[in-house]
C-alpha cells in the first residue's frame, strides 16, 4: 500500500502531488502539536509529573498566530517536496547498509545545515524574518513551525539541497522529515518531566536547551546536539 501511494505520488500531476504532500505535513504538524499540547497540560496540572520550563503567560492569541504560520509552513514544505520527485534515485534503499549510511549522512548534514541557517537568521538582514518565530518567547508545541515563509523555505529546502549532493531514497526522506517535524515540535514543548529516569531526563533536556534559545537569544542554535554550539562558543548551560 505504501509503495503504491509513493508510486501514485511520483507519477501524479504536480497539483495532486502537492495536495497529498500538504495533507501529510498538516496532519503531522496538527496531530503532534495537539497531542503534546493537551498531554503536557494534563501532566502538569492534573498529574503533576512535570512543570513548564517558562511559566510566563502566553501572549494574546499566541496559539492562533502559531497555528496560522504553521499551516503556511506546511504548505511550503509540501511545495519543496515536489523538488525531491525530480532528484531521488530509488524509493527505498537497495540494502541495509545503504539505509544506515543515508540516515547517518543526512543527520550529520542536517545538524550542520540547520545550525548555520539558524545563525544566518540571527544576522541583521534576516532579523525581521526570524523575528516571526521569536514572537513566541514562551514556546508551545504550536511554536515549532510558527515561522516566516522565507524561514519555512530554508527548512523545506534541506532535503532537496541534500539530494542534489548525496543519494537519498524517497522513503527515507519522508520518514526523516516526519520524525524531524515531530522532534522539532518536542523541542518547543516547554516541558520538564519530573522523573528520576536517565533516558527520559536526556529527552527532557532538549526542550530546555531550545527554550533557553528563545529566552536568551543568540545561544543554543543546535538541533539534535550541541556540537556546533560548542565549536563556536554559542552554547549556554541549561539549568
Image (cartoon, helix red, strand yellow):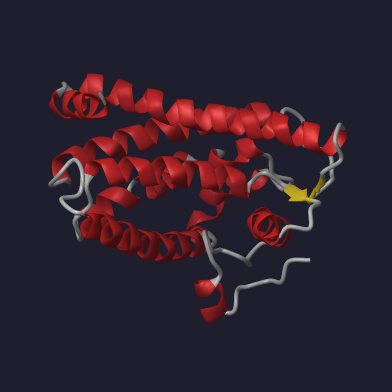
Query: Which residue shows up at 54% across the image and 61% down it?
Result: 122
Can you give x and y, in whole percent of width and height, for residue 184 in the image?
Answer: 54, 47
Res. 233 visible in picture: yes
Can you give x and y, in whole percent of width and height, for residue 188 in the image?
Answer: 64, 46
Can you give x and y, in whole percent of width and height, for residue 1 in the image?
Answer: 25, 23
Can you give x and y, in whole percent of width and height, for residue 140 in the image?
Answer: 68, 40
- Quarter of the image for the C terminus: give it: bottom right
Query: Which residue shows up at 61% across the image and 65% down it?
Result: 220
> Horizontal placement of 65 versus 73: left or right?
right
Res. 62 visible in picture: no
> Horizontal placement of 67 versus 4: left or right?
right
Q: How many marks?
A: 0
Q: Nearer the viewer, residue 200 or 88?
A: 200
- Res 31 → quadrant: top right
Image: 9 above or below 91: above
- Res 4 → quadrant: top left
Query: Which residue shows up at 56% across the image and 38% down it?
Result: 146
Amino acid at each position: 500500500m505504501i509503495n503504491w501511494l509513493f508510486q501514485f505520488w511520483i507519477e501524479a500531476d504536480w497539483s495532486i502531488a502537492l495536495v497529498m504532500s500538504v495533507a501529510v505535513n498538516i496532519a503531522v504538524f496538527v496531530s503532534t502539536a495537539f497531542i503534546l499540547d493537551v498531554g503536557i497540560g494534563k501532566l502538569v496540572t492534573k498529574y503533576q509529573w512535570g512543570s513548564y520550563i517558562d511559566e510566563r503567560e502566553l501572549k494574546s492569541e499566541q496559539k492562533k498566530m502559531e497555528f496560522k504560520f504553521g499551516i503556511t509552513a506546511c504548505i511550503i514544505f509540501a511545495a519543496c517536496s515536489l523538488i525531491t520527485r525530480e532528484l531521488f534515485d530509488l524509493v527505498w534503499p537497495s540494502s541495509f547498509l545503504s539505509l544506515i549510511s543515508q540516515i547517518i549522512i543526512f543527520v550529520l548534514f542536517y545538524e550542520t545545515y540547520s545550525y548555520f541557517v539558524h545563525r544566518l537568521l540571527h544576522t541583521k538582514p534576516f532579523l525581521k524574518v526570524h523575528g516571526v518565530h521569536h514572537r513566541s518567547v514562551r514556546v508551545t508545541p504550536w511554536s515549532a513551525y510558527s515561522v516566516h515563509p522565507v524561514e519555512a523555505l530554508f527548512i523545506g529546502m534541506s532535503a532537496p539541497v541534500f539530494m542534489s549532493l548525496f543519494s537519498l531514497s524517497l522513503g527515507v526522506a519522508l520518514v526523516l522529515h516526519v520524525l524531524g517535524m515531530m522532534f522539532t515540535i518536542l523541542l518547543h514543548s516547554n516541558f520538564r518531566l519530573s522523573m528520576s529516569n536517565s533516558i527520559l531526563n536526556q529527552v527532557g533536556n532538549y526542550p530546555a536547551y531550545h527554550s533557553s534559545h528563545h529566552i536568551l537569544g543568540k545561544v543554543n542554535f543546535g538541533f539534535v546536539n550541541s556540537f556546533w554550539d560548542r565549536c563556536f562558543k554559542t552554547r549556554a548551560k541549561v539549568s
